[in-house]
């Protein structure tokens, strides 16, 4: 196995549950987690603007880090830019994160599916098209930019009651629409997966894509011949965009993962 790192990319902390799941199963891999805090949040941007941001960032990441695989651990980035990134950077393997609509549509008994995502994700035709492909034409999409910000900025400090209130507020809207399956279509929301599951039970089943993404990375690495890189990479880093000092919560996230924390700027 090559020592070139597996790189997870999100606008902020959203990809951490995916990175952690992969790390737990693959403790010997070298991993870089990149949080593009400079451009957070992605979900309120126009598609073309996000494509430009990600093309510039990926170009820099390939030049400075040379990852063997880039995981867009972000639904918004995936739906807006993955196809273009694959075209621009044909030599790099990408894994995208799309809302788990297929398993939700297959599991739904009444054909009514809810998707909670960012504004840009909810706008994408992909969401409706994929559901229709698996037999559901009744999608309720809700954009939750305030939940993205709440999780990014306050997950550590918020009380259980505050978290529960956010979740209940969305579930009330989905219940009014009569859904029986709910897709968490933004990686940030996975931090509240247990709260969603608890509050949604027993009438709504919640779907996420964490294990599917880990399996996809593993199979890609098994099936693809990836050239070796050099040995100079420090193992497991959390990198931030921007030049300001990392906020203290980033140190806590890095500690939790067992990663070292630094700025992407300092890698150039
Ligand atoms: N975590 C990202 C997603 O999965 C979006 C958060 C943001 O708006 O930056 O869509």
Image (cartoon, rainbow, N blue to C red):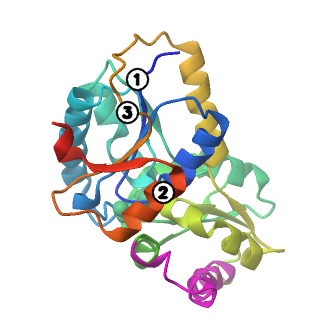
Mark 3 burial class by Cα count in 10 Å: few <14, some 14-19, many 20+: few
Residue 250 lies, with reference to residue 143, above or below; the image says above
Kindly identify which residue carries mark 3: 234
Residue 9: say if magenta: no
What is the spatial separation of the Cα atoms under label 1 and label 2, in whole angstroms? 22 Å
The first of marks 3 and 1 along the sequence is: 1
In this orientation, which residue lies closer to the viewer: 81 or 62? 62
Residue 151, above or below 221: below
Q: Is mark 2 within 8 Å of ligand 1?
A: no
Dot 1 surroundings within 10 Å: few (below 14), some, or many (20 or more)?
Answer: many
Give SS at disc 1. Answer: loop
- Mark 2 highlights which residue? 255
Q: Nearer the viewer, mark 3 or mark 1?
A: 3
| Disc on the earlier residue, 2 or 3 | 3
Which residue matches tag 1? Answer: 4
Magenta residues, as a range?
A: 153-175
Given residues 71 and 180, the one toward you in this image is: 71
Residue at x-position 22% and y-position 39%: 55
């Amino acid at each position: 196995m090559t020592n070139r790192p597996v790189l997870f990319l999100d606008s902020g902390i959203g990809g951490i549950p995916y990175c952690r799941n992969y790390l737990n199963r693959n403790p010997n891999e070298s991993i870089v987690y990149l949080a593009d805090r400079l451009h957070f949040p992605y979900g309120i941007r126009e598609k073309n603007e996000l494509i430009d941001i990600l093309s510039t960032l990926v170009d820099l990441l390939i030049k400075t880090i040379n990852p063997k695989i880039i995981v867009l651990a972000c639904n918004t980035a995936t739906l807006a830019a993955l196809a273009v990134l694959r075209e621009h950077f044909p030599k790099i393997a990408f894994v995208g994160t799309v809302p788990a609509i297929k398993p939700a549509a297959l599991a739904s008994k009444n054909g009514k599916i809810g998707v909670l995502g960012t504004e840009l994700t909810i706008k994408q035709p992909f969401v409706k098209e994929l559901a229709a492909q698996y037999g559901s034409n009744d999608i309720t999409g809700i954009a939750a930019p305030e939940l993205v910000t709440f999780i990014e900025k306050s997950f550590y400090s918020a009380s259980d009651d505050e978290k529960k209130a956010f979740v209940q507020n969305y579930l009330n809207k989905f219940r009014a629409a009569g859904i029986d399956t709910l897709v968490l279509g933004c990686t940030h929301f996975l931090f509240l997966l247990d709260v969603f599951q608890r509050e949604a039970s027993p009438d709504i089943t919640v779907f996420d894509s964490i294990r599917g993404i880990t399996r996809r990375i593993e199979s890609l690495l098994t099936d693809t011949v990836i050239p070796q890189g050099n040995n100079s990479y420090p193992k497991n880093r959390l990198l931030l965009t921007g030049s300001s000092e990392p906020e203290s919560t980033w140190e806590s996230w890095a500690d939790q993962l067992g990663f070292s924390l630094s700025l992407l700027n300092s890698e150039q």
